[in-house]
Image (cartoon, grey):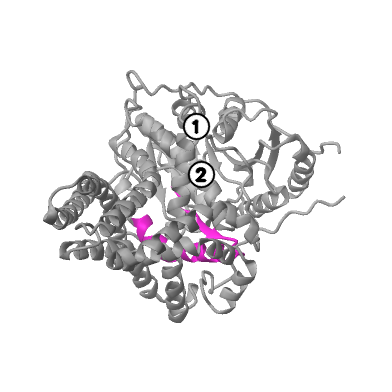
């Protein structure tokens, strides 16, 4: 097929120097005066201090109560191990709980408006924006359908001359013909310019793809909107964010909070509901304390091109993969590099920004495996020169989120050993009952706050199907999430052991569609989960009190293959929708881009 449209615009190179993590940090740009609109509040340090101090107070109080329980029969090696593991785990749990409480309070009091439209002004756009869609062996018709939806939305705003689309392919050569045909069909019907480029060598994965584009064409644009293959954003939102960047020259990155859409399997419906009902409070809390040091999630974010180019040239880490080599979870590091240069990075809770979720627990685990390796790499960057302490905290929290899984399993193992041997421990004694009760309150407290927030507003209630639908959904979500959590933790632990054995994560295309997984495909992945559940079940007569506390863990591990198979079903997803369970868009049709079909 002959190209009807130019594949790429004229070259416009920009320098993107490779950054160093050691030695003197690069000079920071001159800070702009606080403009009252998008900068960090003056009390940001106090907010962060409150968060950290409350976390430490809760963790110390719980650890002290546990210490009183386990020391009743003397100090053993198991007691020391239990107390050592318990403190960081409880601190991580307390941090998330306090963040959710703060978010709920700022939403309830109106200090934060929650998810709202981006402001729009009548003034014309000053800068030009490139909308970048990196793809790697994706369903190109669906990708172009999403891009077509965004191009049409921008055309309705009358701003197409300010926006160019780029499909940046890292796909195999076998997919090039289909991608070219889909691109040509999209370019022919779009009022915005649409370009296509496929790399022959996938150097540096997605960040390498973006860096190559910047070094070749970045100078022609003021901003770039970073997308993933499943991203979808509204035209008004894109234009409004661009106007914010025009007005706030000190801001280098605006990260949106995408809503999950496109659910078909029961697992996707479940995750979509969970993000809608529990996400607002957690996100509002994150916005409350992150200020100008917000994080970057790698997609659905608007970025100032010259700031990114001067700050974010990623080096290859010394050593062999999985800990050395290409930086896999690049986004958090790029946010830290931008802030090191004095640029502001902000998170905005705006409407009309969407993404999809993996269709099954197995697909989510495959994606999680890559994230786990990338986040563990961050431990080697905690010492990087010039990083803001909040960016270091974000790097640490990302790694801690994955290290928590083996620590929880170690905590359970030590508690089981103590219970079988009749020793005082986490699951015996009066103080331990208080500790376990407090732990449950911190685990499920954010869910309760999410329900209260959803029920307190008529519009939110209607969108989630009404009071009855919300309560039915939560009554299913709580046992499902309780049963799934042990299997997820063991899966992450197995993955971390693989990473420690130098087994690097492969770069495979993400599965975005799925239905009815066969049990023969599930059992090999979950055999160790069932073995662990069987061991706990066999030990139950020797530790009746601990067995009662651990019954959700035992049941979750034994039932993990059935849970995976049930939640992977589109049929059960449709049944849930008919029963008004896990409803998320009862007020109107969920935004969905129609796949772009290519004739001939």
Does the magenta segment cover residue 310?
Answer: no
- In magenta stretch: residue 269: yes
Q: Mark 2 highlights which residue? A: 369
What is the x, y in percent for residue 411? 31, 51
Can you tell which of label 1 and label 2 is closer to the viewer?
A: 1
Residue 318: tell me if it is visible.
yes
Residue 33 appears at what percent x and percent y? 29, 37
Neighbours of disc 2 within 10 Å: few (<14), some (14-19), many (20+): many
Q: Secondary structure at mark 1?
A: loop
Horizontally, is 170 left or right of 356 in the view?
right
The answer to which of 254 and 313 lies nearer the viewer is: 313
Q: Which residues are magenta?
A: 255-284
Q: Which residue is mark 1?
A: 502
Separation of disc 1 and disc 2 at Cα? 13 Å
Mark 1 neighbour density, 10 Å: few (under 14) some (14–19) many (20 or more): few
Q: Position of residue 24 (x, y in %)?
A: 32, 19
* Position of residue 545 in the picture relative to residue 225 (left or right): left
Q: Helix, strand or loop at disc 2?
A: helix
Q: Quadrant of the N terminus?
A: top right
């Amino acid at each position: 097929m002959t190209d009807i449209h130019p594949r790429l615009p004229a070259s416009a190179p920009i320098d993107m120097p490779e950054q160093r993590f050691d030695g003197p940090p690069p000079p920071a740009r001159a800070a702009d005066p606080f403009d009252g609109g998008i900068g960090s509040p003056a009390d940001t340090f106090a907010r962060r201090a409150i968060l950290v101090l409350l976390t430490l107070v809760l963790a110390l109080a719980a650890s002290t109560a546990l210490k009183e329980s386990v020391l009743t029969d003397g100090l053993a090696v198991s007691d020391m191990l239990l107390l050592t593991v318990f403190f960081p785990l409880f601190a991580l749990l307390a941090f998330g709980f306090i963040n959710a409480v703060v978010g709920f309070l700022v939403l309830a009091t109106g200090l934060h408006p929650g998810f709202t439209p981006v402001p729009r002004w009548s003034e014309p756009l000053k800068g030009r924006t490139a909308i970048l869609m990196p793809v790697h062996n994706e369903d190109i018709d669906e990708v172009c359908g999403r891009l077509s939806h965004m191009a049409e939305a921008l055309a309705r705003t009358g701003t197409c001359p300010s926006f160019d689309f780029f499909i940046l392919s890292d796909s195999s050569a076998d997919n090039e013909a289909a991608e070219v045909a889909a691109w040509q069909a999209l370019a022919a019907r779009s009022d915005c310019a649409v370009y296509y480029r496929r790399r022959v060598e996938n150097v540096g994965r997605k960040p390498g793809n973006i860096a190559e584009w910047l070094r070749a064409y970045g100078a022609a644009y003021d901003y770039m909107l970073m997308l993933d293959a499943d991203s979808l954003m509204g035209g008004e939102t894109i234009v409004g964010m661009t106007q914010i960047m025009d007005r706030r020259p000190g801001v280098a990155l605006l990260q949106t909070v995408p809503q999950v859409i496109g659910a078909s399997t029961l697992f996707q419906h479940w995750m979509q509901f969970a993000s809608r009902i529990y996400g607002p409070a957690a996100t509002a809390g994150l916005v409350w304390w992150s200020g100008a040091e917000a994080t970057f999630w790698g997609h659905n974010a608007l970025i100032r091109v010259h700031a990114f180019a001067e700050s974010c040239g990623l080096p290859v880490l010394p050593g062999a993969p999985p800990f050395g080599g290409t930086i896999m979870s690049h986004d958090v590091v790029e946010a830290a590099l931008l802030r090191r240069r004095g640029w502001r990075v902000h998170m905005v809770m705006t409407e009309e920004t969407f993404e999809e979720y993996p269709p099954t627990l197995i697909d989510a685990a495959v994606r999680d495996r890559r994230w786990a390796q990338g986040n563990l790499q961050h431990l080697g960057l905690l010492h990087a020169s010039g990083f803001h302490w909040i960016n270091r905290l974000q790097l640490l929290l990302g790694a801690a989120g994955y290290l928590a899984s083996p620590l929880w399993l170690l905590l359970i193992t030590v508690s089981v050993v103590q219970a079988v041997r009749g020793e005082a421990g986490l699951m015996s004694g009066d103080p331990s009952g208080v500790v376990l009760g407090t732990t449950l309150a911190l685990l499920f407290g954010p869910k309760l706050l999410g329900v209260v927030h959803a029920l307190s507003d008529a519009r939110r209630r209607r969108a989630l199907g009404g009071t009855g639908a919300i309560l039915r959904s939560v009554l299913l979500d709580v046992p499902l999430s309780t049963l799934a959590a042990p299997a997820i933790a063991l899966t992450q632990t197995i993955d971390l052991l693989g990473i420690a054995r130098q087994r690097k994560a492969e770069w495979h295309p993400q599965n975005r569609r799925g239905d009815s997984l066969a049990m023969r495909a599930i059992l090999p992945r979950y055999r160790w989960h069932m073995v662990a559940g069987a061991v706990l079940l066999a030990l139950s007569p020797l530790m009746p009190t601990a067995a009662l506390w651990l019954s959700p863990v035992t049941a979750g591990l034994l039932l993990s293959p059935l849970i995976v198979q049930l939640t992977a079903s589109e049929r059960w997803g449709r049944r849930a929708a008919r029963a008004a369970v896990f409803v998320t868009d009862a007020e109107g049709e969920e935004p969905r881009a129609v796949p772009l079909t290519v004739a001939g």
